Amino acid sequence: MWANTSINSHSRERTMGFSELLHTIGGMGKFQILQTALMMFPALLISCHSFLQNFTAITPEHHCRPANWTNGSHVPGGVGDGDLLRVFIPLDEDQKPERCLRFSEPHWQILSLNDTSSLSLDTEVCLDGWVYDQSVASSIVSEWDLVCKHKSLKSIAQSIYMMGQLVGATVFGIFSDRCGRKTALQSGILLMIATGTSAAFSPSFLAYCVLRFLSGMAMTGIIITSLCLTMEWTPTQRRTLVNIYTMYMITLGQAVLTGLAYLIRPWRWLQGTLSVAYVIILLYSWGLPESACWLITHNKLDKAVKNLQAVARLNGRKEQGRKLTPELVRLHMQEDTAAIKETPFFLDLFRTPGLRRTTCCISLVWFSSGFSFFGLGLDVQKFGFNIYWTQLLFTVVDVPMKLVTGLSMGYFGRRITAISLQLVAGCAILVTAFLPRDLNTFKMILCLFGKGSLAGCFSCLYLYTMELFPTEVRQTGMSAGIFSTRLGSLLSPLVYILGNHSPVLQPVMFGLVPILAATTGSFLIETNNQPLLNTIQETEKRVKMARDKQRNVSENTTKKGLASLLPEKTKVECTV
């Protein structure tokens, strides 16, 4: 017993090594505040690109281009444009022009009939293209005719972008753990500027999809490395607050996107504007220091000391920084640096039982969040309301939910918060599957509540995942989570393709998956107010301690239950 206590005490001292170093050089000082502020800009732009296709792929009202339309020649006098269109295009059940059919030849007799439902006239598909509502912003849909039998290409384009994010989560995660957070961040920014700007000049739909795939890779690399770089310079007690600020910037980014899309209607200009903005991040990223935590765990102590001293000077702790030496840092982190592999691999996440369970469980929660969140947020046009106001509502709802999430993480912990938000979102979305069509407004309200809950869950997961994995594989573990959520977001547009055949399938799938993910989240450990781990060995010890504690609580509960029954049984026997 005393030996175990000694081991645990020693482990606690060791895991506090880097936290003590941060406290020595000023804790949450001027540098940390400045870096956090600078890293808010990438978070703002990230959500702009994630929801960009809501506006660049707007589907305007359209109908077939009439056959042999002569622009007024051979048209009887007194016939207006609306009546003229009826001659060439049949009407649907809502008395609007059919989107994908036209008459084989003009039928002028329709103009003299009040009821045309009994007529059986020959129709054909749109052989000469489509006519689009010019009052709506230009989009890839109207430019490349992604309508009717090509309608699914719109969802496929979004899935390709999400596939790029999925690949980027793996590539940049490993790249960041091997080459450093700053190098990976700058590489992602350069890739985003090049591919995002080029997408604005795409000559074809195929070129657009390829460039969007590469942009998705870059976007994921930027968000995971910028967040990891910020968190590794942030003291333990301030990580929750910094995480909340970051998540609010992502929400603000959606509002900024709505405003820019309203002001910049041509899709090419909107695409280019949001991509060129990354030049600003590239310029100030050169002044950011590499993560000292990453440098220390990769035995680059001289460079780590220089960075720590530079931060100490900025924080007004110049004397404390001058006392730091490679030998002192090595003494703090000796066992950590000895246990860490030089080049982490993705399979390291499955090397030990505790880390394996953590990886599988958190990945499933990430998958659920991405699958349902993007499933709800990437097709706001389906509700039939003004798309700009609808997008703004879907953005505003994130604000109170993220505030509630931040408070819940502090009071109830990360684990309970994530599970609760998944359950709430799943139930809200599932209810919409059983509502009639005339309750479209109520459906949107439930979807807003579900989307807000999932947005709150995302803000929890970004911090929770950072705390669950040790420095040795933290970026790789974060990439596993991002990979999972991008896999979910990749599959969500495909559900809309299936939903064209069975509309009830969409809310059922988007509702059931979060409920199933909540059950897997119950197997994770709590990390609230715990120091960041540095090695896989420390992670295994913490998981084992949590498991032993849970087992002891279960045994004590069982014993108390049996003890409460024994006196009653004895009393009955004595009475007899």
Image (spheres, rainbow, N blue to C red):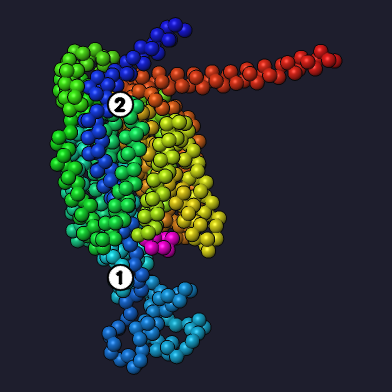
Q: What percent of the width, then of the height, locates residue 258?
A: 31, 56
Please give left or right for residue 198 compared with residue 493 in the image: left
Residue 522 circle label: none
Q: Residue furthest top?
A: 2
Where 126 falls versus 271 (above or below)? Answer: below
Residue drawn at point x = 39 percent, y = 52 percent: 394
Question: Can the viewer see residue 202 in this picture?
Answer: no
Please give left or right for residue 520 compared with residue 295 in the image: right
How many numbered discs, if any?
2
**Which amino acid is tagged 1?**
Ser
Badge 2 marks a residue whose secondary structure is loop
Please give left or right for residue 551 compared with residue 357 in the image: right
Residue carrying label 2: 235
229 is within the stretch colored magenta? no
Badge 1 marks a residue whose secondary structure is loop
| Crowd rating for badge 1 (residues with CA inside 10 Å; few <14, some 14–19, many 20+) | few
> What is the C-alpha distance between the residues marked 2 and 1?
52 Å
Identify the magenta region: 381-387
Residue 135 circle label: 1
| Crowd rating for badge 2 (residues with CA inside 10 Å; few <14, some 14–19, many 20+) | many
Q: What percent of the width, then of the height, locates residue 262?
A: 29, 60
Residue drawn at point x = 17 percent, y = 27 percent: 314
Please give left or right for residue 259 compared with residue 488 in the image: left
Residue drawn at point x = 23 percent, y = 47 percent: 214
Q: Earlier in the sequence, mark 2 or mark 1?
A: 1
Q: Residue furthest front?
A: 316
Where 338 falls versus 109 (above or below)? Answer: above
Question: Can the viewer see residue 329 in this picture?
Answer: yes
Q: Answer with the quarter of the image where residue 474 lies.
A: top left
**Which amino acid is tagged 2?**
Pro
